[in-house]
């Protein structure tokens, strides 16, 4: 079976690093016959290009999913939507190697279920206005994926959800919180569409919300989605 390379963004925060490694352990439990390795696109090492080079031989042509023989490795982005890291860093890492890249984790209804659980754990009320906080990207496709995820969370919660971006796109989370409070006159809860604690999650303390839920974190459904992304590359 091809090696599964779980590729996360990376963080200097120890708690965030522990979350990613816990998710990787869960993925290994879901796929007991598959070797699981870690890699990152920023801040942390090993870098994804280094890991792919070590585990997947170079090849003269671009590897495709239609080839009869399986690749040596599959990079599963532990990232929530497409953007520079998926389209450039990970795509560049697998190019010219016996490796393929899977789709990012989102959008997926299971991520909405995890966010709903995190809101409940943060003691959000049924009448709270909800803003979904997204890291942000200048990539139009990534922004559309965030909008799709907001719709999935709205369906999960059975109430309106506004999407706000921490960086690189509009509206900002702070603006979305202010608009939701003005529109509803109620408390505002932030659902955190981030995989692990780190710099971006820390920024949410200053957006003016009444409560901020924890990131998606180490949850069985996250590992389940990652395993599904791996299997989909192999046509399983």
Image (tube, grey):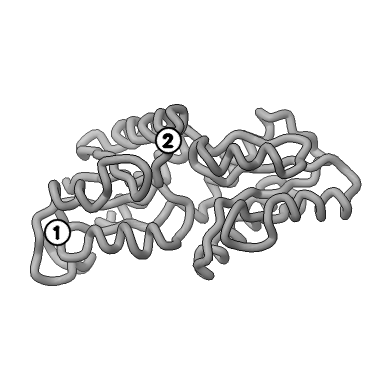
Q: Determine whether 3 is above or below 85 in the image.
A: above
Residue nearest the observer in this picture, 5 or 69: 5
Q: Is residue 8 left or right of residue 168?
A: left
| Residue at 57% from the left image edge and 39% from the top image edge | 114
Which of the two discs, 1 and 2, labels the residue nearer the N terminus?
2
Q: Please state which of the two labelled residues, at mark 1 or mark 2, is closer to the viewer.
A: 2
Secondary structure, mark 2, is loop
Q: Is residue 53 left or right of residue 222?
A: left
Marks 1 and 2, Cα distance to the nearest angstrom? Answer: 31 Å
Secondary structure, mark 1, is loop
| Residue at 73% from the left image edge and 50% from the top image edge | 174
Residue 87: x %, y % from top left:
37, 64
Q: Quadrant of residue 169?
A: bottom right
Residue 226: x %, y % from top left:
38, 45
| Residue at 39% from the left image edge and 42% from the top image edge | 10
- Residue 87 is marked as none
Residue found farthest to the right: 185
Residue 85: x %, y % from top left:
39, 57
Q: Quadrant of residue 148?
A: bottom right
Residue 12: x %, y % from top left:
42, 35
Q: Determine whether 94 is above or below 21 in the image.
A: below
Q: Is residue 37 left or right of residue 56?
A: right
Q: Is residue 198 left or right of residue 54?
A: right
Residue nearest the observer in this picture, 114 or 235: 114
Tell me the residue that label 2 is attached to.
12
| Residue at 36% from the left image edge and 48% from the top image edge | 42
- Within 10 Å of disc 2 (Cα), the crowding (few <14, some 14-19, many 20+) is few
Tell me the residue that label 1 is attached to.
98
């Amino acid at each position: 079976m091809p090696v599964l390379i779980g590729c996360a963004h990376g963080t200097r925060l120890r708690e965030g690093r522990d979350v990613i490694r816990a998710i990787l352990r869960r993925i290994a439990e879901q796929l007991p016959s598959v070797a699981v390795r870690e890699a990152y696109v920023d801040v942390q090492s090993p870098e994804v290009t280094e890991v792919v080079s070590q585990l997947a031989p170079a090849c003269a042509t671009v590897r495709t999913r239609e080839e009869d023989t399986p690749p040596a490795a599959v990079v599963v982005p532990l990232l929530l939507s497409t953007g520079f890291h998926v389209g450039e860093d990970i795509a560049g890492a697998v190019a010219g190697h016996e490796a393929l890249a899977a789709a990012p984790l989102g959008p997926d209804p299971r991520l909405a279920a995890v966010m709903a659980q995190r809101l409940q754990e943060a003691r959000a009320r049924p009448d709270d206005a909800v803003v979904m906080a997204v890291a942000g990207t200048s990539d139009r496709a990534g922004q559309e994926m965030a909008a799709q995820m907001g719709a999935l969370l709205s369906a999960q919660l059975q109430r309106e959800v506004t999407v706000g971006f921490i960086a690189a796109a509009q509206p900002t989370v702070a603006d979305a919180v202010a608009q939701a409070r003005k529109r509803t006159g109620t408390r505002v809860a932030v659902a955190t569409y981030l995989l692990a604690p780190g710099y971006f999650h820390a920024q949410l303390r200053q957006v003016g919300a009444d409560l901020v839920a924890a990131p998606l974190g180490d949850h069985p459904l996250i590992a389940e989605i990652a395993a599904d992304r791996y299997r989909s590359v192999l046509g399983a």
